[in-house]
Image: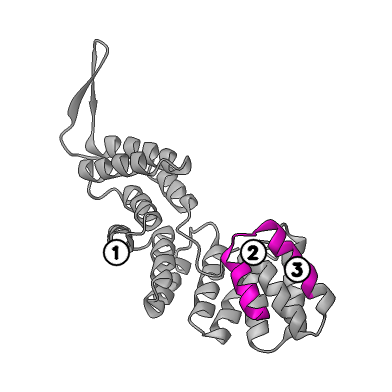
Amino acid sequence: MRRSIPMIALSAVLATLALSGCATSSRETSPQRTGSAVERVSPVRAADINTRLGVGYLERGQIQLALEKLELAVRQDEQHVPAHLALGIVYERIGREERALEHLQRAVRLAPEDGAAHNSLAALLCRVGRYDEAERHFGDALEDPFYPTPEVVLANAGSCARRAGRLENAEAYLRQALEIDPTNRVALFNLAGVALAQGEAFSARAFLQRLEGAGQMGPDALLLGVRIERMLGNREEAERYATRLRARYPESLQVEQLQADES
């Protein structure tokens, strides 16, 4: 599990696509030939088709093809919100964060009440260290009464606040996320980290044990387990986490951090 805010979720784009499936346009349509028949496809419909194709390529890891389809979609309809959201994902994945921000900001301007757009923008703003802006957009996402998973926004907001060193805010967001979803892995992991930073190692252990009970632990969680148990003076349990970390993720940055802790 990564300590930083996760990359923008495809689920946000897919949810927006589902909501935009009935979009219509009064723009002039353009003819396209299929066999001997001529179909007239509106720019909005064409953009929708290419966005769906782009997201499909993105899900399969075919980034260049995804980029081509999504760029075509915004040329066909520059106001197509799902295409801008998906382009935010693509550009972030190839390390072009400024371009990603441009598309996500465009999506928010086009759909100012859409929680998915605000959550996606907030996540990236946090990743680039613009914490105050990120918190504002997380708040805007929570204002959307139709957003289906507010616990995801709360967990992201808490993770971001932790990253910014705002531990009290982080704890408040994360506990709200757990009130909605007691097994939310992002919230459990970050609450363990917050508790450890506050010197509350037993509380940190309790959150990490809940995380472990919810499924396999990633390298960040295993490293956190080592640090928690060392703070508690439990060398045997700390070594158990360290052994799992080395065995499962031998080339990870977390193993390097473990070695630095031990030196």
Report x, y in % for residue 117: 39, 59
Task: Report how far apart the C-alphas of labels 1 and 3 lie in the structure.
Answer: 38 Å
> Which is nearer the N-term, disc 1 or disc 3?
1
Tell us which disc is closer to us: 1 or 3: 3
Q: Main secondary structure of the magenta part?
A: helix
Rendering quarter of residue 18 = top left
Q: Residues within 10 Å of mark 2 (few under 14, many from 20)?
A: many
Q: Based on the picture, tell me whether residue 21 belongs to the magenta stretch.
A: no
Q: Which residue is mark 2?
A: 219
Tag 1–tag 2 contact (CB < 8 Å): no
Say whether residue 230 is visible.
yes
- Left or right? Give the position of 256 relative to 238: left
Q: Depth check: 40 or 223 in front?
A: 223
Tag 1–tag 3 contact (CB < 8 Å): no
* Residue type at tag 1: Glu
Q: Which residue is mark 1?
A: 98
Q: Which residues are magenta?
A: 238-263
At mark 3, the secondary structure is: helix
Task: Report how far apart the C-alphas of labels 1 and 2 lie in the structure.
Answer: 29 Å
> Measuring 46% from the left and 53% from the top, which residue is drawn there?
12
> Measuring 32% from the left and 59% from the top, which residue is drawn there?
96
At mark 1, the secondary structure is: helix
